[in-house]
Structure formats: structure tokens, C-alpha cells
Amino acid sequence: MKYQKRALRVAAALTLTGFVASQIPMRGQTALGSVRPPGSVQPADGYLTGNTDNSGSFLGIRGLTNRNAITGIALGLLGFGAYSTILDSRSIGAVSAAVGAGNNINSTLMTGAANKPIYDVLKSMPGDFVETVKLVDDAELVTELREGGPYTFLAPTNSCLTLDNAALIKLHAPENKESLISLIKRHTIKGRYKISDLLEMKDGATVENLLGDKLTISNKNGTLMINNILVAQNDIAASNGWIHPIEAPIEAQ
């Protein structure tokens, strides 16, 4: 996405430059490379200059040619695009550093993700949750995670799901659809819970998932676990709740 934005900035800059170039008349211009007229101070590049003839100047400003103005505008627009790109890169780096400092799970805070429902946020992060998205698709619970809620979704990461590839393949089999539905609902908690909310709960407190099961919160020395599964302390916002990455799937009770 960030590369698309950069390309749009450059395209906008070039488009605006072309528009400006087409709208400013090149008064006094002759063919490029023309021979300097006898007795004239006009240079061979075709732009009139001098103290007495400013017909090639920008908006009548003596000493500033149309060519100078267009070049300056183009460089200014491209410079603004480059400056914006640098700011974006610094912001992305700061977010990555903040995530890395909190845990070892490859999860990224999504800017503007709060405008998307849980399913769409998961789908926008294939590096972390592409396997979970496939499971949700096969369970046909896309609508639930898009329109239901509010929920707190405990999302197994790609790395933990692919540790047992045989079991993962088995889950995708049509005859195991009911088990797959139960798996997704087991990871979907009723209500919105930020990490700070979960950490404030007493050790041993419970929350309820969509199956009606009680999941036990463990909070010892700042380490957050649910049903003995480590929870990454990241708040990934969605329009209908929160997403927290976990390092292993929650087993059936």
C-alpha cells in the first residue's frame, strides 16, 4: 500500500507539472537551438532575456523565465513527495520497533484498521494471518466476523498453525467443517477486550467465547495467557472489536 501511495504522489506531481507547463504561455520562444538574431541579446536556446525585453519572463517578472518557473514547480512537487515518503518510512519503522519491543510474534499494528471489521483486518495482514483467514473462509464464518460482534478475536499466527501441517490440512477437509466452525468460534470472545482490559482482570478470571465456553485468563508477572496459550500484547483494532495474536491454537475443552 505504501508503494501505491508513493506512485500516486509522483504521478500527481508530474500531472500537475504538465498542467502548469501547458497553461503558461512561452512568449518570445523560438525554435530550440535557433541562431541568435543579429544585434539581439536572445540566447540560442530560444528564451528572450535582457533589461529591455522581458516577453519571455514568468508573469512579467524580469529575470524569471517561464522555464525557470516550471522547473522550480516540478522540483518542489517532487521534493514534497520525497519528503512525505521519508516521513511515512519513519512512521512505519517506529511502529515496527514498538511491536518488536513488546513480543516476538510477527504482528503489525495497522494504521486505520479500526475502520475495517475483524475478517478484513486479518485478510489485510497475510504475513501473519493468511492461514487463519483460510480457516475462516472454509468455516463460512466470514459474515460473522464482518457483521457480528463486538468480539475479541484470538488469532493464531501463520507460524503456529503450520507447525502441524497434517492437522491443518485435515481441518480444511469438507467432512471436518463442524470441527472447523467450533475452532473459529472457540477463538472468538464475546465483547471488546483490549490487552489492558485483560491485564486488569484477576488471575483466574474467565471470558466467554461463541461456543459458550469459559476461557481462563492467566496474568502472572505481566505475562498474559488465555487457557495456557501465550497472548501477544498487541491491540489490533477493528470496527467490530479487537484482534490479539496468539502463539498456538486453543484446544477444545
Image (spheres, rainbow, N blue to C red):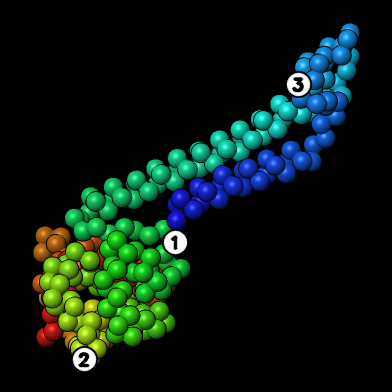
Q: Which residue extends farthest top?
A: 39
In the drawing, does residue 249 fall left or right of residue 190? left
Q: Amino acid at mark 2?
A: Glu
- Residue at image location 76% in from the left, 21% down from the top: 33
Q: Please name the residue that numbered disc 1 is placed on.
A: 112
Between 30 and 201, the one nearer to me in the picture: 30
Spatial distance from mark 3 to mark 2, Cα to Cα?
78 Å
Q: Secondary structure at mark 2?
A: helix
In the drawing, does residue 115 fall left or right of residue 105? right
Q: Give residue 157's position: percent from left, percent from top.
A: 22, 66
Between 137 and 61, the one nearer to me in the picture: 137
Q: Which mark is residue 33?
A: 3
Number of numbered discs: 3
- Residue at image location 37% in from the left, 48% down from the top: 92
Mark 1 Cα-neighbour bin, 10 Å: few <14, some 14–19, many ≥20: few
Vertical placement of residue 225 versus 107, above or below: below
Q: Please name the residue that numbered disc 2 is placed on.
A: 175
Spatial distance from mark 2 to mark 1, Cα to Cα?
38 Å
Mark 2 Cα-neighbour bin, 10 Å: few <14, some 14–19, many ≥20: few
Spatial distance from mark 3 to mark 1, Cα to Cα?
53 Å
User: Disc 3, disc 2: CB below 8 Å?
Assistant: no
Q: Give residue 25's position: percent from left, percent from top.
A: 83, 35
Residue 231 can be seen, yes or no: no
Question: Residue 136 lies in what quarter of the image?
Answer: bottom left
